[in-house]
Image (cartoon, rainbow, N blue to C red):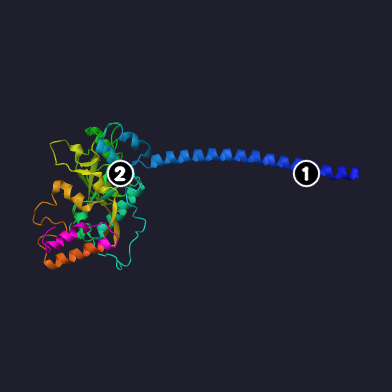
Amino acid sequence: MRQLHRGGVCPIRRAIVFIVCVSFLYLVTALDHDETFQRQVSSSDSVVRRSGSSEEKLPLRERNTTRAVASSGIFSNVGASRVFLIDDANAMVDLTVRRVFNKTLCPVEPMEKDHPKFVEFLAFFARVFRTKYNNTPWWLDEGSLIGVGRAGTILDADDDFDFFVLLPNSTAPCRQGSLECTREEFNVLIHRFLLPLWEAGACIRRFNPDINKFDSDRRLLYTLQIRNPNDTHNPLQCFNSRAPFAHMHLGMLNADGELETNKWVGPNSHPKDKLPLSLMLPVRRCRLGACDAPCPFDIVGYLTLRNRGEYMRNSKDGACLLVKKKWSRVRKINQVKKVQLLHDCGYNSMISLKQRFIDTNYSTC
């Protein structure tokens, strides 16, 4: 019995010891693997951040510094509250995501005709600003915005492609602790901003990729086309004055958290707009022909202030953004139907002007 008992116990003890040893080795290996994995993740994250910083040459939203900048004294109290709009992850609409809308209200999509070049510009700038500029907010501007905001087509109000870009690094455009730039600093800033557009295939009038041969001359805007990749001509002579073009308007922040135009050209030059960020951000979706395009959050409020109220002053087109004064009554009524369709299909529009226009018997809004 004892021999049998010993013979039975010893193998069990050996088995237990074996299991304990194996478990211990497994635990040590697992811990070592986990530690190695953590180091790899940390290293990988570091590499991603470093490579991301180098590829995203013009980061707009520096999430770790915005709060510090807002409370640094650079901005006024109202400016400090507004600047956080830039830091919002949804500051720029994602046009690659399909919109959600009520198909009962919108059984048929708005499909107004637009110039093929304008559609090409839209696709090009949407791709470049998303991939090369860290999704910098941009939106249609001036006459182009009027056209898409009331009818879903630029051709309704304009004959070129106008858009606006908030210059990146807006809380410290040229140096830390300041919203200002000297002439030389601005020249470097704007060249650095334009270069990725050039490298992506944009033809930029009066631009040279060699910064030593470039002078921004503090221009108010830039005129762009898209270069033909098969063109064998000198790329510096790519601009075709007879072809459609795009006008890119630019703005920088001021201490009140407003987007200020022409801030870099001095106090006694071209008039400046001062546009609260809440009018533009978050950028929303509007319609351009058969495509989706970016528009400021409050189209009517934005255009009311843009170009110092130019679009709201009495003129040959009248003071109503929805229509032109010279249009027939039938065309004005059809325009109301167009803006209603845009609204029903989930697009940003000038719908806020509709009822006032109807109440004046299609006279003004």
In this picture, is 75 found above or below 126? above
User: What is the crowding at mark 2: few (fewer than 14 residues within 10 Å), some, or many (at least 20)?
Assistant: some
Write down the quadrant of residue 277 in the picture: top left
**Nearer to the camera, 341 or 187:** 341
User: In the rendering, at what x and y percent does residue 50 appear?
Assistant: 43, 38
Which residue is painted at 68% across and 39% down in the image? 25
User: In the rendering, at what x and y percent does residue 272 appear?
Assistant: 16, 41
What's the amino acid at mark 2? Leu
Q: Is residue 192 left or right of residue 141?
A: right
What's the amino acid at mark 1? Ala
In this picture, is 233 found above or below 356? above
User: In the rendering, at what x and y percent does residue 53 appear?
Assistant: 39, 39
Which residue is painted at 18% across and 64% down in the image? 335
Counting labels gives 2
Which residue is painted at 76% across and 40% down in the image? 17
From this viewpoint, is residue 289 visible? no
Q: Quadrant of the C terminus?
A: bottom left
Q: Is residue 25 left or right of residue 297?
A: right
Mark carried by residue 15: 1
Whichever of labels 2 and 1 marks the residue nearer the N terminus, that label is 1
User: In the rendering, at what x and y percent does residue 299 appear?
Assistant: 22, 53
Q: Is residue 355 magenta?
A: yes
**Nearer to the camera, 114 or 329:** 329
Q: Is residue 145 magenta?
A: no
From this viewpoint, is residue 56 visible? yes
Q: Which residue is mark 2?
A: 85
Q: Which residues are magenta?
A: 342-365
